[in-house]
């Protein structure tokens, strides 16, 4: 399959493209273009060819293809190798399976699945989505002190995902502390960072991302429907292939930024600008103590900072704390 043709058609969002324009953009002769279009049709692309208007993509195949998602990413780090599978326990599991290959072979690997039947969220929650309805992705890379940097990498992953959605949609995406992506206070996605202890300074880390794309309301459990959403429910007909590519491009830039002087501080600032938790009254627990207070700040080292009753300031690490109640209706988590 020639991804140059398919991606040019996807970018038109169903509009006709003159054949001469499509050939020029793809760098193909008319004969090679005709052959490429025939191959796309064999691969399940529904095309409409008009003698005057050109070619239109009526409907792509339902699944993601590595040839398209990974096209022209040889110079990048994140996504320089892409795998797309139909069903998996979780994309994070699939990424961790590649660690034994070492950084030379596996650094920057991106895996995508159409369905995961043991997808993970924070604190052991499960992330469920019907097949072909979400972008379910994990990227594997080696970084200095991965366990110590899990919190900032969580913010990096959330920031990259939020920006990727905005690259493809006309939506404003916020981050609900510490790892949820929200549109108007309803969860549209989430990020899970996993790091494991290894000898030496550098080690592997996996950033897993789930983005709800085409689910109708009835795809979500009834009790979660007021708190979760999908891009189509927000009025956006997103192309999952283009969103997957945007996610890899954003992750590539932001992961690189995290390893430069001052990069972590910039990620913190950009993520905080999107934070939908600041200034709210929430109830939070670390598994031992449950507290209610106003969110004052998101601290790079201590996680969330609350003003508790009688003015006491409490600091709660992001990796061991979670919100159990939010003072704003419909703003609590779920869907993961």
Image: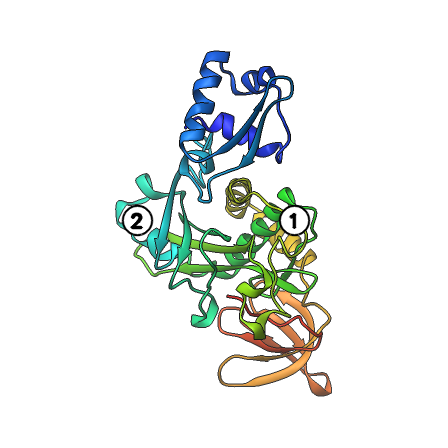
- Vertical position of residue 38 compared to residue 271: above or below: above
What's the coloring here?
A: rainbow
Which badge, 2 or 1, comes first in the chain's sequence? 2
- Vertical position of residue 280 compared to residue 110: above or below: below
Q: Nearer the viewer, residue 316 or 106?
A: 106
Q: Which-is-in-front pick, marks 2 and 1?
A: 1
Residue placed at 63% from the left, 66% from the top?
298
Considering the numbered disc 1 on the image, is that residue within a helix, a strand or a loop? loop
Whole-number angstrom distance, CA of label 2 to CA of label 1: 35 Å
**Residue 170: % across, % down:** 70, 46
Relative placement, left or right, of 280 versus 336 is right
Considering the numbered disc 2 on the image, is that residue within a helix, a strand or a loop? loop
**Quadrant (top left/top right/bottom left/bottom right) for the N terminus:** top left
**Residue 137: % across, % down:** 45, 51
Among the 4 quarters of the image, the one containing residue 70: top left
Q: Nearer the viewer, residue 296 or 231?
A: 231
Q: Which residue is mark 1?
A: 236
* Label 1, residues with CA under 10 Å away: few <14, some 14-19, many ≥20: some
Is residue 18 visible in the rendered image? The answer is: yes
- Vertical position of residue 61 compared to residue 145: above or below: above
Looking at the rendered structure, the number of numbered marks drawn on it comes to: 2
Q: Which residue is mark 2?
A: 98
**Residue reaching furthest to the bottom:** 310
Among the 4 quarters of the image, the one containing residue 316: bottom right
Is residue 201 visible in the rendered image? The answer is: no
Residue placed at 61% from the left, 48% from the top?
165
**Residue 179: % across, % down:** 55, 62
**Residue 277: % across, % down:** 67, 68
- On residue 115, the disc is none
């Amino acid at each position: 399959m020639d991804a140059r043709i398919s991606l040019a058609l996807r970018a038109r969002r169903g509009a006709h493209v003159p054949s001469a324009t499509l050939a020029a953009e793809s760098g193909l002769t008319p004969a090679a273009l005709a052959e490429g279009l025939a191959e796309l049709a064999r691969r399940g692309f529904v095309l409409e060819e008009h003698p005057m208007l050109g070619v239109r993509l009526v409907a792509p195949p339902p699944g993601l293809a590595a040839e398209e998602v990974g096209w022209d990413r040889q110079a990048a780090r994140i996504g320089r190798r892409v795998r797309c599978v139909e069903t998996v326990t979780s994309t994070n599991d699939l990424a961790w399976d590649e660690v034994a290959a070492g950084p030379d072979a596996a650094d920057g690997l991106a895996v995508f699945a159409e369905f995961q039947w043991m997808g993970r969220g924070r604190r052991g929650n499960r992330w469920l989505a019907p097949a072909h309805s979400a972008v379910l992705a994990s990227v594997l890379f080696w970084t200095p002190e991965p366990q110590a940097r899990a919190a900032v990498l969580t913010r990096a992953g959330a920031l990259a995902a939020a920006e990727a959605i905005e690259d493809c949609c006309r939506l404003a995406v916020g981050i609900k502390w510490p790892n949820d992506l929200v549109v108007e206070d309803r969860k549209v996605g989430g990020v899970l960072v996993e790091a494991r202890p290894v000898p030496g300074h550098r080690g592997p880390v996996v950033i897993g991302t789930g983005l709800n794309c085409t689910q109708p309301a009835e795809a979500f459990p009834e009790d979660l429907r007021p708190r979760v959403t999908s891009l189509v429910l927000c009025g956006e007909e997103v192309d999952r292939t283009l969103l997957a590519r945007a996610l890899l491009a954003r992750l590539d830039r932001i992961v690189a930024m995290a390893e430069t002087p001052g990069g972590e501080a910039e990620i913190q600032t950009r993520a905080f600008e999107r934070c939908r938790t600041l200034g709210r009254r929430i109830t939070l627990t670390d598994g031992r103590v449950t507290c209610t207070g106003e969110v004052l700040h998101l601290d790079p080292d201590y996680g969330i900072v609350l003003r508790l009753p009688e003015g006491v300031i409490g600091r709660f690490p992001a990796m061991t704390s979670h919100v159990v109640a939010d003072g704003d209706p419909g703003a609590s988590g779920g869907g993961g």
